[in-house]
Image (tube, helix red, strand yellow):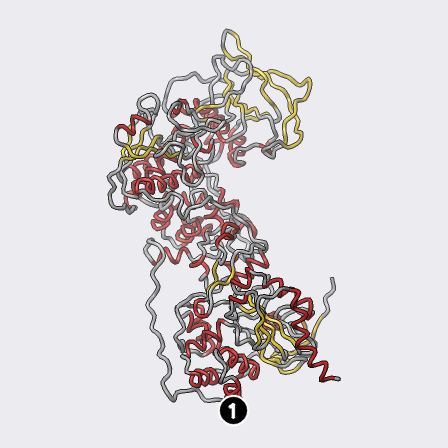
Amino acid sequence: MRHIMVKLTINNKSVEVPEGTTILEAARQEGIKIPTLCYYQDVKPYGGCRLCVVEVTAGPRTALTASCAYPVAEGIKVQTDTERVKKVRRLVIDLLWSRSPDLPILASIAKELGVEKPSFQLGDSQCILCDLCTRVCNELENMGVIGMQGRGSKREVLNPFGELSEKCKECGSCGFVCPTKWIHEVVDIPAPCTLTCPAGINVQGYVQLINQGKYQEAVELIMEKLPMAGVLGRICPHPCEEECRRRIVDEPVAICNLKRFAADQVDLKKIKVEIAEARPEKVAVIGSGPAGLSCAYHLVRRGYKPTIFEALPVAGGMLRVGIPDYRLPKKVLDEEIEKILSLGVAIKFNQAIGRDFTLDSLFADGYKAVFLGTGCHVGMKLGIPGEDAEGVMQGVDFLRKYTLKQPFTLGKNVAVIGGGNVAIDVACSALRMGSKVTIVYRRSRDEMPAHPWEVEQATCEGVETMYLTAPLAIKAENGKVVALTCQRMELGEPDASGRRRPVPVAGSEFDLPVDMVIPAIGQRTDASYLEGTGIELTKWGTIVADEVTHETSRPGVFAAGDAQSGPWIAVGAVGGGEEAAESIDLYLRGADLRAGRSKKKKHHRPARFPVGGVIQPREAMPTLPPEYTCSCFDEISIGYSVEKAHAEASRCLNCYSDCLEKYLETGGKGVPAPKPRVLVPERGPGQRTAYDKPADEAAVKAILNKYKDEQGNMLPVLLGINRHFNWLPRPALEHVSDELHIPMAEILRVATFYNAFSLVPRGKYIISVCLGTGCFVKGSPRLLERLERELKIKSGETTEDMLFSLEPVRCIGCCALAPAVRINEDTYGRLTPDNIPKILKMYTEPLAAQGD
């Protein structure tokens, strides 16, 4: 598409840009610096901060104007650094800095503009009312969650409608565009990686700490949520990386590998874990898998001394007996479990619920709450003939027997049925033990649920895979397996899982000679111990528990992990364990379990999130060669070197968050308290700033005299001054303060918050549509739309005849009349869109009569 080019002059330099370009964009194209806080390329500009003011000296409309909102026109001349421009910018930054004196970004801009310190006492807010967050939320993301709330000096950017908070998808766009990052004080916006992590780990924070070489601090930050960084750093499928915005640039940050690196650098004995004041209540935790260990860890941090009851002779659950050493060395697991136990957690082995004790007996023994984290340790049957033959063993049983060194007979030719991670672990373990292994999977490799890197590793080590093949029967002779009867499949339409359904190919049956069959098609929980306990179960046999509080149908009993969710990932069980621990603590304290808690929201990826960044390939994880690993259980992944870890951590885009700085400022103890402020004293009597010209002072006196008898005359006086000067000079503000006997701080609050010092070209009648909370709720956006149609202009524009200017304002102080519109000093309330033409007619008819 060919663009129409427009020629203009900026600082006496000829410039040519496409039609529709703003003065700010044209200046930036030429390398001319114009300060701004509220500009963002993907939303319609309206000059909220006014720092980008320039002077148009030649063209259809010559005036001071906000360059971000002024489109270029043929032949206009612009000056960006005249003395008049500098004065306005200094006033604007002074106002902003006085309201938010603790913001470094304002101090930096003020220094560049020659303002040494804030001049006024306006407050200590960090919101500069640039409106970027509200416009991105409403215009770009179409969420409609953030709005303006409050009036006068208490005006802030907040979510004014409590019922809309559920609409927030925590996309983080508001936090990204906020020039001061203050929005993080209003809305707790985690980075997408943190939001996606089932355990809620501050991913962004620990990645940045690793980049700074602060490995112990990184592990301490991880352990605020996750007590097993080394374990999860090896086996987590890292859903966080799926939402990492680095993937928009090239590839996601290797978050999981970095977690493992940090854990490998630290001696856990030196990690300090804060423990709350001791609590007397006894709590039982059933199961020492990831959910149980997490629950116990977070309970002990809250002051309890929980006791874990474990059915096996070892701790760890599926982490111990379901994951081979080549993926998770037992030494790593042992060290992290020992750290949890050292904090005050007791554990009893070979204690199975339903066999050695019951829920009733626990409560009878004085336990006040019980957590159920029994996992899913029962393999799913194939449901085919011959499944009871000798030589058939469930995948989870195979891995458990090998880990616990229990006796079993391993076949020489093994068929593993399934395509998940357990099937891959079984196949690779059997291969290392000397068997010839074939995986039988009824779909193609693309549909395989196992992690792609695990499938690739198995293939490289020598595991054979028969895709599009389904087992029909297990053949046995003398009660022992001799073959697996299979049938070829082809893919049909997708099923409920989204994967294409396998369809049998007629006449394609064949026998696969094997002497051992290991089904690994899924697991379920054994909930037989819950019969007669009052615990409700789902149709799948999992425990029914509240998705927020993890309460079961029996008071005092909570559940999480695979026993509640069904087979899922370990980090999900860890997150559930922490949430259950919080609920147990609240329950024992007699508090509301739901207060301030809600179901986790699904991350919403912003429509146009600017990421920047230079292409930098992801650091590959060094591994042992498959020709070596295929014959031993040594850990395959070697781990990052320091150089690789820092290079990988440096790829993090640090999405719109200041969480790391907050963590470091407080030594890892939360958000720091506000810094003490030294307020600049008000000016004394007779210290008023002089006017540039006597005529200016005379004009202000005339305006003051015009409104001297009106009640509440400050606002019309300021509006009159604004129309005369097209901005609010400081001498005029001080003059108004003295004459009306109103403190300068109050004058400046009105000037700042009521949008009175507008710098865009003005018509004879200024139409201000109130978008304050009350007006907005009662329909002021519809009034604005009707005015735009009637006047044939957009908000912030002036009609060609310079008769009307249209602007949305944040408040005009008349909520009782909502929705309201003000035209110059006249206010019209309780309007409907149909009233708009009648009101406009009142202003145009006198002019028409004068023309006659």
Residue occupying image coordinates x 48% and y 27%: 428
In front: 823, or 499?
823
Does residue 547 lie above or below 802 as drawn? above
Viewport quadrant of the N terminus: bottom right
| Quadrant of image for the C terminus | bottom right
Report x, y in % for residue 422: 48, 29
Lateral position of residue 682 relative to residue 704, left or right: left
Residue highlighted by disc 1: 698
Q: How many numbered callouts?
A: 1
Write down the quadrant of residue 507 in the picture. Answer: top right
Question: Can you say whether 776 is above or below 754 in the image?
Answer: above
Front one among 277 and 216: 277
Residue 212 in picture, x, y percent from top left? 39, 55
Placement of 441 over or under 283, stated as above or below: above
Toward the top, the furthest residue is 478
> Residue 32 is drawn in which quadrant?
bottom right
Amino acid type for the residue under numbered disc 1: Ala
- Residue 794 seen: yes
The x and y percentages for residue 58 are 65, 82
